[in-house]
Image (cartoon, rainbow, N blue to C red):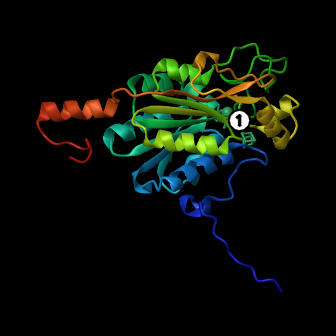
């Protein structure tokens, strides 16, 4: 008789194993993004006590609860205000917002642009599956023109955001886009953003075969991955305005912004120190 051996996956220590199995459908891309994020943390030997993972509501938003670090699953659309509060209270922490396109750019859109404008040190990782997955496949701000969703049965008549263009225009210091198939480049990009001081944004184009794929007759998760492989092109540092996502033609991926500018919490703390004459490292601990 074969003996059963319990083998630990190298990323297990970074997961809350008691929360597994996860909720994601077969063929969904969200797990690939989580895997790349955990790999980046492991390769950097990142101090998990210095990490906070925040998400909003949605399928992608479930990721925060699976990471073995401090974190918070906020209400829909509010992970960035929560992350801002964490960063202001304890500026020595690294805050990562892991959430969906609807959460971050519909109800949470205003928070996104102002956090980018202020250059608050955080990494926002957006899983863009072109719809509201968790609530039944409604159209959202990244749904392509003409695409069918549960709320656009005759085809979408709204123009989608180009997220990397929006992030760059709002002032993010690091901006990149990958698909779930660019695992190595995505991981390297996440590593770079984790080490960067300032507002970083990484968009990952991901399949939702259960809803977006089904409404648009795109086949299985594997078929949708093949489409991403065929249509994606890497064009680093082109004008983000030109970095289109057109599932019927091409998906432009790459790094588009990598720059430096003064970071908000550093400026706040400098001001507090100057005005109080005290060495303050946290406004909640002094
Ligand atoms: C204030 C509020 N409005 C609406 C909802 C319903 N809701 C939950 S998840 C979600 C959309 C999630 O879409 P997205 O962020 O793209 O995540 P996905 O499920 O696609 O990963 C919505 C509208 C809610 N929970 N709270
Ligand atoms: S509904 Fe879509 S986004 Fe949500 S878990 Fe299923 S495949 Fe993924
Ligand atoms: Mg979504």
In the rendered image, the residue lying farthest to the left is 277
Q: Is residue 153 left or right of residue 169?
A: right
Residue of label 1: 135
Task: Tell whether circle 1 marks a residue whose Cβ is less than 8 angstroms from ligand 1.
Answer: yes
Picture quadrant of ligand 1: top right
Which residue lies at the image location 58% right of the left edge and 18% below the top edge? 239
Q: Is residue 114 left or right of residue 129?
A: left
Whether residue 239 can be seen here: yes
In the image, residue 226 above or below residue 39: above
Q: Position of residue 183 (x, y in %)?
A: 66, 44
Q: Position of residue 131 (x, y in %)?
A: 71, 29
Q: Position of residue 32 (x, y in %)?
A: 67, 47
The foreground one among 80 and 253 is 253
Tag 1 secondary structure: loop
The foreground one among 194 and 284 is 194
Which residue lies at the image location 85% right of the left edge and 34% below the top edge? 214
């Amino acid at each position: 008789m074969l003996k059963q051996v319990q083998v630990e996956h190298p990323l297990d220590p970074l997961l809350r194993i008691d929360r597994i199995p996860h909720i994601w459908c077969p063929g969904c891309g969200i797990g690939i993004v989580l895997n790349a994020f955990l790999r980046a943390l492991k390769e950097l030997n990142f101090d998990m006590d210095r990490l906070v993972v925040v998400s909003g509501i949605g399928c992608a938003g479930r990721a925060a609860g699976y990471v073995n670090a401090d974190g918070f699953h906020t209400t829909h659309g509010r992970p960035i205000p929560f992350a801002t509060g964490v960063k202001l209270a304890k500026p020595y922490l690294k805050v990562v917002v892991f959430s969906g396109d609807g959460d971050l750019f519909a109800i949470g859109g205003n928070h996104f642009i102002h956090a980018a404008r202020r250059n608050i040190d955080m990494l926002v990782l957006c899983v863009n599956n072109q719809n509201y997955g968790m609530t039944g496949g409604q159209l959202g701000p990244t749904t392509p023109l003409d695409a069918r969703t549960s709320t656009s049965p005759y085809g979408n008549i709204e123009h989608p955001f180009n997220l990397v263009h929006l992030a760059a225009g709002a002032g993010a210091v690091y901006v990149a886009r990958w698909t779930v198939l660019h695992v190595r480049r995505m991981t390297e990009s996440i590593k770079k953003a984790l080490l960067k001081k300032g507002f970083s944004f990484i968009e990952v184009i991901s399949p939702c075969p259960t809803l977006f794929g089904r409404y648009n007759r795109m086949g299985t998760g594997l078929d949708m991955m093949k489409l991403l492989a065929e249509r994606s092109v890497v064009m680093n540092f082109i004008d983000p305005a030109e970095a289109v996502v057109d599932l019927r033609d091409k998906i432009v991926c790459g790094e588009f912004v990598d720059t430096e500018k003064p970071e908000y919490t550093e400026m706040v703390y400098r001001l507090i120190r100057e005005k109080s004459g005290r060495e303050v490292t946290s406004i909640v601990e002094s």
